[in-house]
Every structure is written in C-alpha cells, then in structure tokens.
Image (cartoon, helix red, strand yellow):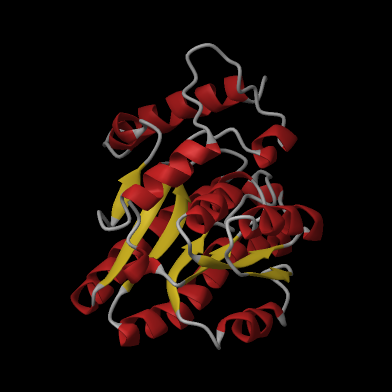
Amino acid sequence: MLDTEVYGPWAVIAGGSEGVGAAFADRLAAAGINLVLIARKPGPLEETADRARKHGVEVRTVAADLLDPGTFDAIRRASDDVEVGLLIFNAGANTYGAEFVEGDLEQFQRVIDLNITSQMLLSQYFGARLKKRGKGGIMLVGSLAGYLGQPGIGVYAASKAFGRIFAEGLWLELKPHGVHVLELVLGVTRTPAMERAGLKLDRPGLNVADPEDVAQEGLDHLADGPVWVAGGNLKTAEANSGMARDQIVENHAEAVKRLLGH
C-alpha cells in the first residue's frame, strides 16, 4: 500500500501521458493522490488526466516539451501552490539515433538536455521542496541501456548511465532528510513508444514487461533505493555491469540487432 502521507497529497509526473507514465498516473490516482501531469502530446495527456479524475482526484496538466525554455515556469505555476510529495521523472527517451561520428551534434545535445539537464532541473527544484518538507520521494525512470555502450544510441545510453549515478548521489544527500530517491531501471517494456520504434517484441525468449506491472513495482519499492531493476532484469543488469567489456558490448549489440529485426 502506497503511503499517501509520505508521497501525497500531490505527485508530479514528467512524461505522464502514455505507457509507464500513464500507468503511474492511474495507480497514484487510485491511491487518492492528486496529479500534475507533464507531456508533449495534448491528446494522450488529457486522456490520462480524464481517466485519473474518475478516481476523484484533482489533475492539472502541462502540455509542453521539456526542452522548450518556458516549460519549467509552466511547471512551477502548476505546482507552486500545492504540497508535492513525489516527483516521477519518466520523460527521458531516445529522440535521436545515429552513429556518433556521422550524427548531428545538435540532435545529440537534445538527447542530453532531455535525459540529463531536464532531469537535474526538476530534481533540484522539487528535491529542495521535499528536503524542506522532511519527507517524500523522487523516482527517476532509467533503462538497462545505461549499463553498457550501444551502437547508434551511444549518447542515449551514456545519458542513462548518468541517471543511475546521479540517483545514487541524490539518494545519499536526501536520505538523512526523509526523502526517498529511486532509479527504476526498465528493460524492454510494451509501450506505445516501443511500438512506434518498430521493435520486435514478440521475439521468442525476449523478456517484455507491461507498463502497469513495472509502474506498480516502482511504487512498491520507492523506499528501496537508490536503484531498483524492474521486470525481472536484475541478472541482466548484473551481467552487463561486469568486466571484459569488449565481449559484453559485442554480444549485446548482436542481441539489439535481432530485436530491431536486422
């Protein structure tokens, strides 16, 4: 049972319109926690908000891109007058994939700004409020991609590696103040974004998680930071953390090619 005294009465979800973000919204609303939902796409955002409101909670929406200069002010306006007990940063995504030496540096910078800069900005702002409050939580949604380098998405993978180390440091800093910090590491998850990417999720032997399951797992383990690997992927994360890096990354690159149908 989610402790609403700790993580309520309001939660902010960046990337809260579909997939895992929408699953977080559904579960928090069912627990009676009011929501501030942030996402780029107004349609899915309002659909998720309307579904959450059926649980009797208040929902505010910010339909904006985290990379736009005015978005942070819009988030502040939507949340400054309420008591926020939980931040979920679920907005990190791979918005651009290319071989690094041939890619567009501006596009790579956008990946970094979304997955690192925006995460730091919201974590500092809400983290300071939670520290002063003396309780609450921050969940940063990570990826198994952050455990090893990958061709074509090397900058994204590196940004996810940053997220894990960042979460560990933030956990150490906020733990004495009653604030829980968790990086929830996801593997392959059946989300609209994965479907749009054309991934072969029906490949035999592939461990595919459902958004509802990993969202519930994350909420169940908010106090078990700094890192929780969801969806039964702990052994994979541990294997990808080993040495002999050349063999590990080459084997994984071949597995990714099969997932992409190459």
- The percent position of residue 234, horizontal first and vertical second, equals 31, 35
Residue drawn at the location 81% of the way across and 55% of the way down: 43
Picture quarter containing residue 177?
bottom left
Q: Is residue 92 visible?
A: yes
Q: Is residue 137 visible?
A: no
- The percent position of residue 256, horizontal first and vertical second, equals 55, 27
Total number of numbered discs in the rendering: 0
Q: Is residue 148 left or right of residue 198?
A: left
Residue drawn at the location 46% of the way across and 37% of the way down: 213
Q: Is residue 21 left or right of residue 47?
A: left
Up the image or down, 17 lies above or below 137; here it is: above
Residue drawn at the location 62% of the way across and 56% of the way down: 52
- The percent position of residue 161, horizontal first and vertical second, equals 42, 53
- The percent position of residue 58, horizontal first and vertical second, equals 61, 69
Q: Nearer the viewer, residue 2 or 249?
A: 2
Quadrant (top left, top right, bottom left, bottom right) of the C terminus = top right
Residue drawn at the location 37% of the way across and 27% of the way down: 247
Q: Is residue 115 left or right of residue 163?
A: right
Considering every residue shown, the one lying at the far right of the view is 43
Up the image or down, 66 lies above or below 253; here it is: below
